[in-house]
Amino acid sequence: MSSETTTPAPAVREEIAQADDIIITENVDKWFGDFQALDDISLNVREHEIVVVLGPSGSGKSTFIRCLNRLEEHDAGKIVIDGIEMNDDVRNLNAIRSEVGMVFQQFNLFPHLSVMNNITLGPRKVRRMPKLDADALATQLLERVGIPEQADKYPAQLSGGQQQRVAIARALAMQPKIMLFDEPTSALDPEMIKEVLDVMQELARSGMTMIVVTHEMGFAREVADRLVFFDEGNVVEQGTPQHFFENPQEERTKLFLSQIL
Amino acid sequence: MVDMPAPNPQRIVLPPHRERARRPRIVRLREWVKRNLFHSRMGTLLTVVTAAVGALLLYGIIYFVFVDANWRVITDNRWLLFAGGYPMDQEWRLWFSVSFVFLLIGMTYGTWASLGRRDHVFIVLVSGFAILLLAHGGAALWSTLWYLIAIGLLYVGYAITIRMPREAGPRRTLQQRIVTGLLIAALPIVLIVLLAFGGARPRELDGFVLNLVLAPVGIAGGLVLAIPLALGRASRMKAISWTCTTYIEVVRGAPLLGWLFVALFILDDVIGGELIVRAMVVLAVFTAAYMAEYIRGALQALPHGQGEAAHAIGLSQLQSTQLIVMPQALRISIPPMVGQAISIWKDTTLVTVILPLRELKGNADSAIAQFEFTPDRIEAYVFVAVVFWVVAFIMSRISQRVEGSLGIGER
């Protein structure tokens, strides 16, 4: 069975080594009917840490990060985000959601709103930010993701890569402490993947705490502080990129890596 | 056949259709006719038969309209058909409302679409029809003048709004908000103009005016009721979902005529009041059941990701519905909703069964009940049919154009 090997990371960045856990999950279970998607997951993430989650489809990796902002409700266990426990208290949930940004595989931009309004909607409606401030913030974020000239277009007028960068800007507009990425490049044409990964890499360097579900091994190797391998709702193995790509311990990890590398 | 010019090796050879496009129009026309009408023996036969039937039909129509028919049944009963029991000295209120609505139609076109050649042709035809009708009897001049003012306002509203910039931006948003606000306010404003401050009593709304009041109230009221019904039916709370489902299934299960009789006999004890109010309630309640189902269908067609993305940026359930889900669902459901609106527009003729209410078709019956006009039934009913068709066509046309321009934001 799964032995949760917590290999001590040899090359942990200084800032992480001293940081506290910002995400704490203890014994989390999630069931979809008779299917157990998450089986007793305990996984903590430190502030500023970049965690890349790998695993075959159906392994529970997406379900796991979707539990972290309660797009899925966990059935058992405990989830604490930045000191706030996830429970039925709506105030807690709103506090958590405004600290956790999420980027989806299918972008999920709002097609009836302009790029500008996609980004400013959250700050204005949730944070009650004045329109002028929100617009200034959005302009700044669009510059950060490299498409300031697209502010007045509608999502359908943008390429996939541009849409995903707008989606990142939209999540950042809430000024979250944590960013979750659910296969952010899987729906993109190959030539657009890099522009999105570049934005994510810049974000990682800026000190954001990130959990990234992806199949982009180059990104995982270069940017991740820690890789976590999911299979059948369990964390099978975790460790540094070096550990993973050069010396994986578990058979299932080896098999998975041999299939996608 | 026409010979193709021999390709000149020194020049770039254009693709064949470009070559064709440069030849004289008469040659292209001849080719078009051959290709589309006479390209085979069967095609030729069908063309000839269709043309013959069409010609016969056209001859019949022209003969009826210009020779056979006695249109005095319409022109002599102009006021009866148009407004019936509405006080004649308050005619300006009717025209004021018409002008206001025409202005709004112009502004709607100018904001979300543009008038094409076909629209102008349609407006000219309808205006000709209206003026032919109005230019009789004592007040003919004034009525015609009022109509011309109304049409003029349509173009004024159009001319103002079409000049505004179309690019997204604060001015565009403001313009859209103003026009949308006016459209929402239009119905109450018209009702106030017609009824308040010395206007008619509700029971004096009559003839075509009654149709024109009942249908929008039914449609607007139906839409307002339909949104919570659709959300309720999709709700996870069983009590709410069952209540809404029951409402929808019960109301859709019986014909409108049946519900109008309910309004006549049963609602009298429950809500009492004016017959016309009861008719309005029934029309709204009936329309709501259908519209709720169209909205529910649109809600289901929306990708799940929309609601998830809304929650992920911290919007509450209410905000997500109001700002993200419902605007998109309403847009998707425009085509069936307009279908339902046209349907309820025509169904306003059914209120004639509630006797004291006389709308256009009912008043046409009255017109031909006069001894001198008894032979002119067909004229009266043809007229009623044409009038209903014109309004239905306007609805359909506006929705098509607006839908097309709203497509910008679609995925």
Image (tube, coloured by chain):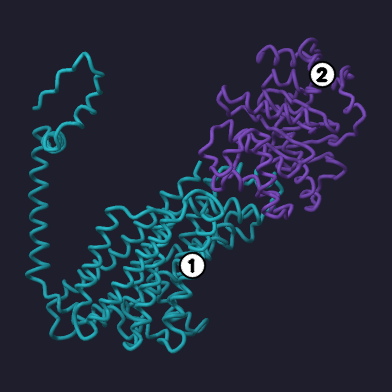
Q: Nearer the viewer, residue B165 or A168?
A: B165
Residue shown at the point (61%, 27%) measured from the top left: A186
The image quarter containing residue B391 is bottom left
Q: Is residue B100 left or right of residue A245?
A: left
| Residue bearing the label numbered 2 | A240
Secondary structure beneath label 2: loop
Q: Nearer the viewer, residue B243 or B133?
A: B133
Amino acid marked by disc 1: Leu
For marks 2 and 1, give the one nearer the viewer.
1
* Mark 2–mark 1 CB contact (< 8 Å): no
Q: Is residue A197 left or right of residue A75?
A: left
Secondary structure beneath label 1: helix
Residue B187 seen anywhere in this rendered image of the structure: yes
The image quarter containing residue B254 is bottom left
The chain letter corresponding to cyan is: B
The numbered disc on residue A80 is none
**x, y percent for residue A255:** 71, 13
Residue shown at the point (13%, 38%) measured from the top left: B37
Colour chain A appears in: purple
| Residue bearing the label numbered 1 | B182
Residue shown at the point (21%, 82%) measured from the top left: B77
Instruction: Count numbered badges in the picture.
Output: 2
